Image (spheres, rainbow, N blue to C red):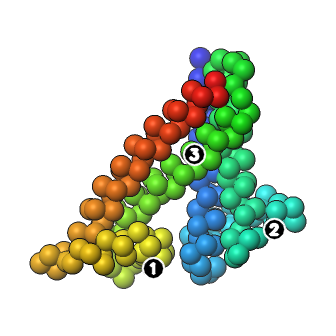
Amino acid sequence: MLSQISIFLLDTLLGLFSLALLLRFYVQWFRVPYYHPVARFLVAVTDFIVRPSRRLIPSWRGLDLSTFVLAWLTQFIMLLGASYLQDYGNGSSIIGFALVALIELFRLTLYILVIMIIAQAILSWINPHSPLAPVLESFTQPILGIFRRYIPPIANIDLSPLFAIILLQILLMVVANMQRTVALAFQ
């Protein structure tokens, strides 16, 4: 029972911190204004570790790689810790944990997109001028723009979020299968 509690706390705390780091990476990538409350919250939560890591990990083409590497490292530590607490380290490969952590970040990104597309669709009907709307638009525009090019609105209703969510769900299935394959290959 103590190991279950420890795994739960590890997953929750490190999972939320990894999510905050990943969101900060995307907020900076999509150029969400620094003064926006979401951006300020993410900076306040993660700045204590991102600033020192920037000295070691430089940016690349405008991408804050230190934040991404920290999100990956957090996922890696979370997976390694949970594996150790579950079965006291069954001899799984460090490379396997590293790859699964990277795949887990990709899976988390897909979930972020699904949630943001749903939130944007709901906000567009309830309050299209919400302060959160520009942030959601900057995140979802790359994927929704693809579908909006080919699927026109029907009776003034944009169906691109529906098709984007279907595509993202298919990608989530592929990622889950890939994660199982990598985990089994390095076991």
The image quadrant where one finds the C terminus is top right
Count numbered badges in the picture: 3
The quarter holding residue 134 reads bottom left
Residue drawn 54% across the image and 52% down it: 106
Q: Which structural element holds mark 1?
A: helix
Regarding mark 3 in the picture, which secondary structure is present there? helix
Q: What is the quadrant of residue 53 in the picture?
A: bottom right
* Amino acid type indicated by mark 2: Pro
Say if mark 1 contacts mark 3, CB within 8 Å.
Answer: no
- The answer to whether residue 10 is seen in the rendering is no
Discs 2, 1 touching: Cβ within 8 Å = no
- Label 2 or label 1, whichever lies nearer to me, is 2
Packing grade of label 2 (10 A; few <14, some 14-19, many >=20) is few
Report the front residue among 122 and 173. Answer: 173
Locate residue 49, reporting x and y percent: 79, 58
1 or 3: mark nearer the eye:
3
Amino acid carrying mark 3 in the image: Ile
Above or below for 76 versus 187? below
According to the picture, the residue beneath numbered tag 1 turns out to be 134
The percent position of residue 159, horizontal first and vertical second, equals 23, 69
Q: Nearer the viewer, residue 36 or 187?
A: 187
Q: Can residue 180 be seen by looking at this rendering? A: yes
Provide the residue designation for mark 2: 58
Cα separation between marks 3 and 2 = 23 Å
- The image quadrant where one finds the N terminus is top right
Q: Which mark sits nearer the N-terminus, 2 or 1? A: 2
Q: Residues within 10 Å of mark 3 (few under 14, many from 20)?
A: some
Q: CA separation, marks 1 and 3?
A: 28 Å
**Disc number for residue 103:** 3
**Image quadrant in which you'd find residue 185:** top right
